[in-house]
Each structure stands twice: as C-alpha cells, then as structure tokens.
Image: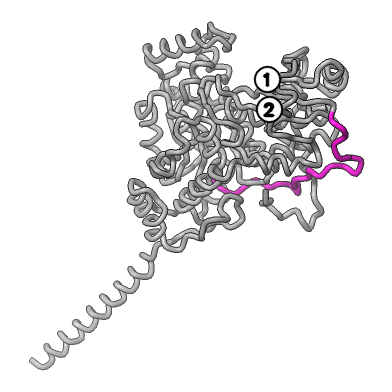
Amino acid sequence: MQKRKLISLVLLRKLLTTAIFSIAFVALFSVPHIVPSSKDHKFNDKFPTTKNLQSWTQELAPPHLSKTLLHTSKLNGSKRDSNYEKLWKPPSNRGFLPCTKPTPNYTAPVESRGYLLVHTNGGLNQMRSGICDMVAVARILNATLVIPELDKRSFWQDTSNFSDVFDEEHFIDSLANDVKIVKNLPNELVNETRMVKQFISWSGMDYYENEIASLWEEYQVIRASKSDSRLANNHLPPDIQKLRCRACYEALRFSPHIEQIGKLLVERMRSLGLYIALHLRYEKDMLAFSGCTHDLSLDEAEELRIIRENTSYWKVKDIDPVEQRSRGFCPLTPKEVGIFLTALGYPSNTPIYIASGEIYGGESHMAELRSRYPLLMSKEKLASVEELEPFLNHASQMAALDYIVSIESDVFIQSYSGNMARAVEGHRRFLGRGRSISPDRKALVRLFDKLDQGTMTEGKKLSYRIIDLHRRRLGSPRKRKGPISGTKGMDRFRSEETFYANPLPDCLCRTEPSLQNISHIAQ
C-alpha cells in the first residue's frame, strides 16, 4: 500500500515537472518578434522605432487596420530567413554613389535675359521630370524661371498648385546657385506681350542656345506650352546633367504635409515587415490609352474604347489589343502579377503596397491577386479617413504618397513601364536603395498564354523560367541605354532610355574601395 503511494507521488512529480517545462517553452517562443523600424530611411526620421505593436496600432493606425496588424505574421521580415538573399537582399551598388556637385568651372547665374514661364503637362511624374528639365533649360538660356504651373486640364482634372505638391521655398533656395527662380512675374510684365512656344522634343544645347535664345531680343517673357521630354537624354554637358539630378533628387521635395503622411504610411508598412511596393498600372486611363483589354468583359472594352475616342489629345484611336499585348505594350493584369510573384517565390504572407489610383473593375479584377496575397495594402487602408481627407480629389498629391512609399520599399515592382515606374526606378538607383524588378512583359505574355491554353502548369518549371528571365533585372547600377540601333529621327530619341530612369553615368560615380559598402545614401 505504501509502495503504491510512493509510485503515485513520483508520477505526480513527473507530471508537474513536465507541465512546468511545457509552459516555460511555450512562453519563450510565443513572444512576438517585432522588426524595428529602419533608421536609415529618409521618410522615417520623425517617427519613433516600433517597440510595441499593440500600442502602436492604438496610437497611429486607423481602427479598420488595427486587427489586421495585430494578427499579421512577420516571418518575412527577418534577415535570418533563408529566403532573404533570394527575395529581399538589395543588389550590389558596385561602388556607385551620388555625385551631383558641379565641376570647378561652374559659375553662379549670370544676368538674366528674361523670364521663362512653364506650363507642365501630364501626371505627377511626367510634370516632375518636365520641371527638372526646365530648370536646366533656364540655366542654358540664362533666364529667370517662374515657378511652373501644374497641369489642371489633363485626364485627372487636378486643381493643385505647385506649392500644394512641392516645397516651394526649398525648391527656390536650393537652386539659388544654379538658376534664379521667382514665384510670379514682376507686376510690370504681367500684361507684357509674351512668346508662346512649344519647344521641340529631345532638343540639345544648340537648339536652346541658338533658336530659342534669339527670341529674347524681341520678348521679355517666353512661355513654354509643354514641359515633357523637351531636353535630350544624352550628349549634354556634365554640369547640365548634374543640375537635372540636383533639381530632381534634392530640390524638388514634396510639400511638408505630403511628406508627413508619406512617412506615416511607410512606418505602418514597415510594421508588417519587409514589403513590396507594387505599381499596379491597371487603371482606367492607362487601359483606355493603351487599348489593352485582356481579361476584360465586352462592356468594359467598349467603355475604354469610347474614352480613347473622346480624348482629343490621345492621337492613336484604332488599336489591336491582341497585338499590343503580344508586343509587351500592355500592363500586367492583377492576376498575372499574382502568378509572377508566386513564381519568384514570395510567400503568401508578404505585405504588398498597391501604388496606384483606382483599379479598373475594382475587386472583380483584384480577387485572384488577393487570394494569393491577402496582405494587400494601400494608402486608403493604411490611413484613416481624417488623415487622407486633405488629399482626396487631388490625383497628384495622392500619387506623391504612393511615390514616397515606393521609394522606401524593400522591393519595387512595376506592372508597366510608365512615367511613375521609370521615375521611382531611377530615384532608387540614385539612392542605391532596395531591389527594383522590371518584368519582361513580352516574354511573360507567352508564358501566361501557355498557362491559359493548358500547355504549361504552375510549378517548378514555370518558376525556373521566370526567375531565370528576371535574374538580371533587379535595378543594379548600369550605364544608361542609348538609342536602338537602326532607328532614325524622332524614333531614335524615343528609343533611348529616359534620363530619370537611370542617372548613370552623369550623376553616379564609383567611390574609393573603403566606401563601397555604403548602401543607403541620405537624400
């Protein structure tokens, strides 16, 4: 009897010991792993490092986002993850760092010949590059630049002024040693006769120094009716090229209220771990302009055709959508992007920031991408109604928020090589930041068609093909591409790689070996 009691007591002790160890083990490994906010990113310097996710969501996140954040796994955020090298590690900057300082021969602005008025055209990034080009043109012409007028008549009908989108005082002050810039024409010249001129696209120094400069003899004010692509990409003096970079990457800063919310969006994305910014150019204007109708209904295709027909400044009206897609001229659909990301190996818990306007067809076209990647975020999801309210109905300001989050992302992926995609890729090259993936749409379409036809299935074979196809398309430094061989006239200039998509060699220089490990440059 006493022996049985002793045995029972021993068994009880063993059970208690096992239970205590089990509780301790569970407690040890259930502590949430929080990735600290990066301190070497430009848009994070005003916000504290995330120490407590629950506290953070209560203080900063809008109510509809808190539950998502609190239940999100952050396995993708660790550099110890075996997939980090394959999926997230930035490509080597190969020793290149920004070098935008002028040469020793560069002088302060000389006496102004007259005033240059500029009417920008297009969306945010088309206007942005045009403004930087006009800074350089004003320097070439020895002209005083009047703060450019933003496009209010394009597809987006945005009423924003320059100071609503950009930091006007910073723009003027930071370029004071390059170009004289004023906010308005002097009163005595407001009613003066002015020359309205559409500068010839992709023009070099000779055009501006000879043909345009001679107009100052007759007029005190010249108005440039368009600003996009008015300056050559290549074969310009080094100081003019460096000035373009100073204007774009240093002087043309977003206005304080845009920067503040942009930084907040970045911080909220970073709380989810390493993230992808996806520029999903699947918007009504893009599809109407390009004539791309793959996977759309007949009614949707007809709606887009009518928009294209009724938009007077879009010159091409009759477009074969099948040919467009086969030549790689169409943006990837949300479904195709999902297949692409899966093939590259990004897991389903990857946070993805959708940088775009309203997706055409809404959830009906986003469902398949969302089924693969549930953590699809956007400015509308990350910010509260009150935080986003000042930017609503202002397409350029909303696009600026997307630009900030895209620049700071760990990976940037474009579905179409438009103005924003090129601008973000170029800016990230300049900063040496993250990896940027530019899908080979022409090759991908052939693979996607095989999936649709059933001659190929998703799996290792497709993944190998797609990974091999994009192994070298990660945004590492390389010299800007010149015109395609055999092209002539305007097509020759059109075929060149855009200056703002790749500022090398003009604005990036190799450093000393001791500095080659620097990967992030303060902007």
Residue 466: tell me if it is visible: no
Q: Start and end of the magenta stretch?
A: 87-112
Task: Count residues near mark 2 (Cα–Cα under 10 Å), then give few for <14, some for 14-19, many for 20+.
Answer: many
Q: CA distance from mark 2 to mark 1?
A: 8 Å
- Dot 2 amino acid type: Gly
Residue drawn at x 16%, y 90% as measured from the top left: 6
Q: Main secondary structure of the magenta part?
A: loop
Confirm whether the magenta stretch covers residue 101.
yes
Residue 259 sits above or below residue 59 on the image: above
CB atoms at circles 2 and 1 under 8 Å apart? yes
- The picture places residue 506, in percent across and down from the top left corner, at 79, 37
SS at circle 1: loop
Residue drawn at x 45%, y 9% as measured from the top left: 306
The part of the image, by quadrant, that contains residue 226 is top right
Q: Could you say which disc has been placed on residue 226 in the image?
A: 1
Q: Nearer the viewer, residue 336 or 107?
A: 107
Residue 246: tell me if it is visible: yes
| Residue at the extreme top | 318
Residue 308 sits above or below residue 32 on the image: above
| Residue at the extreme front | 188
- Dot 1 amino acid type: Lys
Q: Nearer the viewer, residue 466 or 163?
A: 163
Q: Could you say which disc has been placed on residue 130 in the image?
A: 2
- The picture places residue 358, in percent across and down from the top left corner, at 43, 28
Q: Could you say which disc has been placed on residue 371 in the image?
A: none
Task: Count residues near mark 1 (Cα–Cα under 10 Å), then give few for <14, some for 14-19, many for 20+.
Answer: many
The part of the image, by quadrant, that contains residue 109 is top right
- The picture places residue 256, in percent across and down from the top left corner, at 57, 45
Please indicate whether residue 492 sits to the left or right of residue 353 in the image: right
Residue drawn at x 53%, y 26% as measured from the top left: 444
> Disc 2 or 1, which lies upstream in sequence?
2
